[in-house]
């Protein structure tokens, strides 16, 4: 009896102490660091690995340390855990992205970023906290994309944070004290995705009097056309049957063309100013929408998370637009979607493969170097791909055809695909700078820019009341609900076969096959979901076959789609209907608006670059 | 004088009277070449130009030809006056072919850039500094050692004179020339015609217009209908033609036609056709039919 009592007392004491120790633990998200130094926030894979993280994208030069102050309730010894990974582990035994952590005046002896292939809590040893307010800093060692998601300080050595994602999410909410009683903000129209399509959708609806929320999970607008990705706008605007469509793209689009050019080419501020000048738009930069609340087949609310502090905002509206590219909102809402390549029989498309497969177009990690007046070195890396003179590329700029991930899952494997893009750029550059027989030609070349946000071409395509196919395009099957005209050739990318063979089946170079088309007005029924009542789409995630995606995916076309769904939103509000109701009962109102456009028609026409080949008749 | 181009180009224009087009400080003269019937056929220009890149100069002598609506067709060199590059290195066959490909591509990416982007490294960026990336991209499509002259020749072939040549052809339009142009069955030429006919000409060329509408597809028919003066739709022959063709037109052409019928009395066959084309969905087409018939 006495023993039982003692045992109970022992366990009770243990639980109290354990609980006390846990209550003194602290979770610090890297993305919340006050001073990020040279580290960037990367949210591209947060739906998969659970959080935004900081990445040291220094292109071979260690980046400036990130710093923040942390308040410790109790001084004394803490065990440190760091959530990180070795991003080159899939390809090499050596690690590229190493970093150290300094806590107060102590540098942890462990070097991070070299242990686990997957995201994992790494033990960082024990640290003595001598004051309540302590500076923590992240010190990049290599300049090659070391990454850290979070740090955890605990009094209990066995209090290891969970690696499993659902548990980790609960752990984060509890440790960060994130508010679960969220307040809603009401809007007429919520646009998710601030690329060219989403930006135009928001501008269009706002100019037609709607109260609009625009949610973008990057610090700038523009998506693939932003200075983070640097793909120039493509395809044509101001085409029949609605020549006024595209004036909006002309307003916000950059004046100069060119992929992988200096930052100024992409005119980020111009796009931002256009949105900031619209009093009807509430802009939410650095918010990632990752949850929906449904009532039947209707989206009632979308919840978006702040990338830096985890704060969640709730957006309530009668109408939503998925301009995410990945069809994220549609996917969360249960919208039907297509992915990969459909078989020839599915839509009777001549260009489709005999059998359906998972092949998608890839992600481009573009780059360029610049000749300088001095010799510039680049690290002779030991974690790169094995290269020789034949397999390497003696070039100074990587354009769209540096493309990775063809055939991989564009959502689940996005981090791997982007990382492979980085790996091949750095491997190639290191080889031609240090080993190539013509390396002297590159001695003054400095790697100026490498994208760390991948330029994505394809993922989910949400199914609408109509699926646009190759036959519609090639047979000029114009439908009465035609809207924004797509004009770029059917432009589909495939892995370069030699490159694929040279690199164990993992191509990083691609080629394109073009099938020019006559400009074709995209049916409105491709711009709303067939099974989610109040969801429209603009951009690459609209209702098209894989083959038809080859033409509609160009950004000027996406911008015009955005212009159209912004107009549609205004009609839906005025007529108290949804997109399908608009198609059936109020389509003439949309036709009238499309004839007028919402862009400024009197501005100089500056969108004259990268128009693409076309079968279009010459109109002038 | 680094990176400056000196360009002096002379054209002679010998059809009827000489026409000189001034482009900034440069003068150009065109020559219209006639066909065997004495009708205008081709526009030709002789270009003689010293081109300097950095501190070295070379001379280009070249003849360019366009069709009557300003589309570049071909170039020729003079006997014994082949093209040369820097250091007077003669063009080889490959260079001529490359120049030919470049000049015949009106959508070439070279048109996406301004000359100053190619000449000066002025493209400073707040993060990247400046770059020669643009020049490198262009190098892939121009004749080696001749980026600026390739750029200039492409601009002359595809941009500078298109509108001027069209204006010149417009001033020469008469029935013979219109008949010749229509007989080409060239969509771009057809567009040129309907964009440059006077309203009264549409009536004079009614049969030719009907023929163009019959043989063409796409948006040409819509554009032609929009260009046609409203009076022409009062003509019962025209109405009968459209009554028979209406259902073959695409939706947008149908709407354009219906818009032209405002305050026009319709013949029974056209009324009947429009009635049969109406359905229950809300659309501009249905609204216009309803407004016209009910």
Image (cartoon, coloured by chain):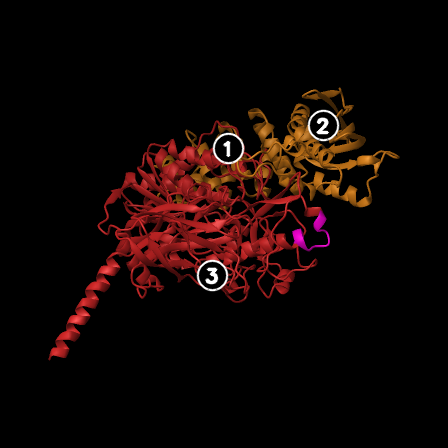
Chain colours: A red, B orange
Q: Magenta residues, as a range?
A: A432-440
In percent of the image, x 46 and y 32: which residue is there? B260
Q: Nearer the viewer, residue A326 or B22?
A: A326
Which callout, 3 or 2, points to the residue nearer the camera?
Answer: 2
Q: Earlier in the sequence, mark 2 or mark 1?
A: 2
Q: CA distance from mark 3 to mark 1?
A: 49 Å
Q: CA distance from mark 2 to mark 1?
A: 48 Å
Q: Quadrant of residue B293?
A: top left
Is residue A493 visible to the viewer in this orientation of the structure?
A: yes
Task: Please tell me whether mark 2 sits on a helix, a strand or a loop.
Answer: loop
Q: Is residue A531 magenta?
A: no
Residue B275 image position (x, y, % from top left): 39, 43
Looking at the image, do the residues carrying marks 2 and 1 touch, with CB atoms under 8 Å apart? no
In percent of the image, x 22 and y 60: which residue is there? A20
Which quarter shows the C terminus of chain A? top right
Which residue is identified by label 3? Answer: A409
For disc 3, the neighbor class at 10 Å (few under 14, some 14 to 19, many from 20) is some
Q: Nearer the viewer, residue A3 or A615?
A: A3
Q: Report the side of B154 relative to A302 (left or right).
A: right
Residue A94 image position (x, y, % from top left): 54, 62
Residue A199 image position (x, y, % from top left): 41, 40
The chain letter for the residue carrying disc 3 is A
Which residue is identified by label 2? Answer: B4
Q: Nearer the viewer, residue A80 or B16?
A: A80
Q: Report the side of A339 relative to A262 (left or right).
A: left
Which callout, 3 or 1, points to the residue nearer the camera?
Answer: 3
Task: Please tell me whether mark 1 sits on a helix, a strand or a loop.
Answer: helix
Q: CA distance from mark 3 to mark 2?
A: 51 Å
Which residue is identified by label 1? Answer: B226
Residue A102 image position (x, y, % from top left): 41, 51
Is circle 2 on the same chain as circle 1?
A: yes
Which quarter shows the N terminus of chain A? bottom left
């Amino acid at each position: 009896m006495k023993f039982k009592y003692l045992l109970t007392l022992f366990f009770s004491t243990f639980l109290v102490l354990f609980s006390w120790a846990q209550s003194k633990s602290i979770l610090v998200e890297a993305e919340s660091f006050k001073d990020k130094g040279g580290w960037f926030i990367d949210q591209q894979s947060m739906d998969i690995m659970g959080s935004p993280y900081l990445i040291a994208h220094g292109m071979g030069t260690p980046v400036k340390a990130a710093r923040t102050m942390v308040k410790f309730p109790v001084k004394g010894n803490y065990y440190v855990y760091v959530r990180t990974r070795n991003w080159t582990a899939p390809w090499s035994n050596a690690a590229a992205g190493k970093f150290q952590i300094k806590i107060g005046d102590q540098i942890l002896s462990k070097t991070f970023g070299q242990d686990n292939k997957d995201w994992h809590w790494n033990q960082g040893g024990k640290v003595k906290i001598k004051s309540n307010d302590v500076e923590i800093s992240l010190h990049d060692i290599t300049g090659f994309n070391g990454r850290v998601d979070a740090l955890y300080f605990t009094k209990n050595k066995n209090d290891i944070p969970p690696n499993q994602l659902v548990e980790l999410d609960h752990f984060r909410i509890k440790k960060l004290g994130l508010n679960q009683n969220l307040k809603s903000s009401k809007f007429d129209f919520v646009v998710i995705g601030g690329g060219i399509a989403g930006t135009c959708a928001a501008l269009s609806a706002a100019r037609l009097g709607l109260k609009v929320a625009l949610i973008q999970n990057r610090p700038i607008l523009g998506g693939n056309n932003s200075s983070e990705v640097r793909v120039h706008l493509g395809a044509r605007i101001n085409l029949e049957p609605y020549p006024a469509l595209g004036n909006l793209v002309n307003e916000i689009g950059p004046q100069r063309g060119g992929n992988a050019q200096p930052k100024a080419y992409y005119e980020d501020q111009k796009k931002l100013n256009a949105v900031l000048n619209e009093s009807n738009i509430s802009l939410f930069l650095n918010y990632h929408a990752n949850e929906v609340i449904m009532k039947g087949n209707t989206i009632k609310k979308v919840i978006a998370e702040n990338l830096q502090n985890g704060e969640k905002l709730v957006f309530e509206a009668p109408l939503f637009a998925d301009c995410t590219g990945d069809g994220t909102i549609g996917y969360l809402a249960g919208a039907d979607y297509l992915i990969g390549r459909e078989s020839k029989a599915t839509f009777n498309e001549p260009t489709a493969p005999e059998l359906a497969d998972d092949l998608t177009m890839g992600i481009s990690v573009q780059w360029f170097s610049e000749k300088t007046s001095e010799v510039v070195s680049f690290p002779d890396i030991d974690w790169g791909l094995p290269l020789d003179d034949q397999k390497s590329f003696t070039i100074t700029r990587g354009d769209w055809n540096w493309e990775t991930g063809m055939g991989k899952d564009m959502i689940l494997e996005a981090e791997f695909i982007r990382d492979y893009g980085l790996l091949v750029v750095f491997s190639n550059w290191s080889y031609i700078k240090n080993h190539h027989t013509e390396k002297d030609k590159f001695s003054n070349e400095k790697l100026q820019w490498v994208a760390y946000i991948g330029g994505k071409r394809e993922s989910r395509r949400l199914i609408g009341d109509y699926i646009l196919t190759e036959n519609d395009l090639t047979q000029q099957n114009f439908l009465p609900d035609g809207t924004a005209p797509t004009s770029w050739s059917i432009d589909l990318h495939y892995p370069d076969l030699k490159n694929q063979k040279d690199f164990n089946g993992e191509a990083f170079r691609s080629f394109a096959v073009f099938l020019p088309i006559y400009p074709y007005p995209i049916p409105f029924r491709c711009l709303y979901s067939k099974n989610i009542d109040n969801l429209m789409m603009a951009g690459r995630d609209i209702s098209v076959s894989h083959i038809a995606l080859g033409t509609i995916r160009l950004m000027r076309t996406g911008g015009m789609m955005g212009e159209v769904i912004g107009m549609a939103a205004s009609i839906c509000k005025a007529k108290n209907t949804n997109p399908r109701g608009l198609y059936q009962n109020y389509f003439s109102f949309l036709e009238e608006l499309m004839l007028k456009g919402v862009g400024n028609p009197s501005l100089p026409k500056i969108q004259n670059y990268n128009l693409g080949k076309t079968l279009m008749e010459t109109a002038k | 004088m680094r990176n400056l181009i000196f360009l002096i180009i002379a054209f002679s224009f010998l059809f009827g009277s000489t026409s000189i087009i001034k482009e900034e400080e440069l003068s150009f003269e065109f020559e219209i070449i006639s066909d065997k019937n004495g009708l205008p056929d081709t526009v030709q220009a002789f270009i003689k130009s010293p081109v300097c890149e950095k501190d070295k100069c070379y001379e280009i002598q070249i003849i360019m030809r366009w069709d009557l609506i300003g589309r570049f067709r071909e170039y020729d060199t003079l006997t014994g006056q082949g093209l040369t590059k820097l250091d007077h290195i003669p063009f080889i066959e490959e260079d001529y072919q490359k120049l030919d490909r470049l000049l015949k591509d009106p959508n070439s990416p070279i048109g996406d850039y301004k000359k100053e982007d190619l000449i000066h490294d002025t493209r400073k960026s707040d993060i990247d500094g400046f770059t020669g990336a643009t020049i490198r991209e262009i190098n892939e499509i121009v004749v080696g050692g001749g980026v600026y002259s390739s750029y200039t020749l492409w601009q002359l072939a595809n941009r500078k004179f298109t509108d001027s040549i069209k204006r010149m052809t417009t001033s020469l339009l008469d029935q013979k020339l219109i008949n010749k142009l229509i007989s080409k069955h060239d969509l771009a030429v057809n567009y040129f015609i309907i964009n440059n006919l006077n309203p009264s000409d549409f009536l004079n060329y009614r049969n030719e217009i009907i023929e163009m509408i019959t043989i063409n597809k796409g948006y040409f028919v819509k554009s032609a209908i929009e260009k046609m003066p409203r009076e022409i739709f009062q003509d019962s022959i025209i109405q009968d033609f459209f009554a028979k063709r209406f259902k073959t037109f695409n939706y947008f052409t149908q709407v354009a036609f219906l818009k032209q019928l405002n305050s026009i009395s319709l013949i029974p066959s056209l009324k009947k056709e429009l009635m049969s084309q109406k359905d229950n969905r809300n659309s501009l087409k249905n609204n216009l039919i309803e407004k016209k018939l009910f």
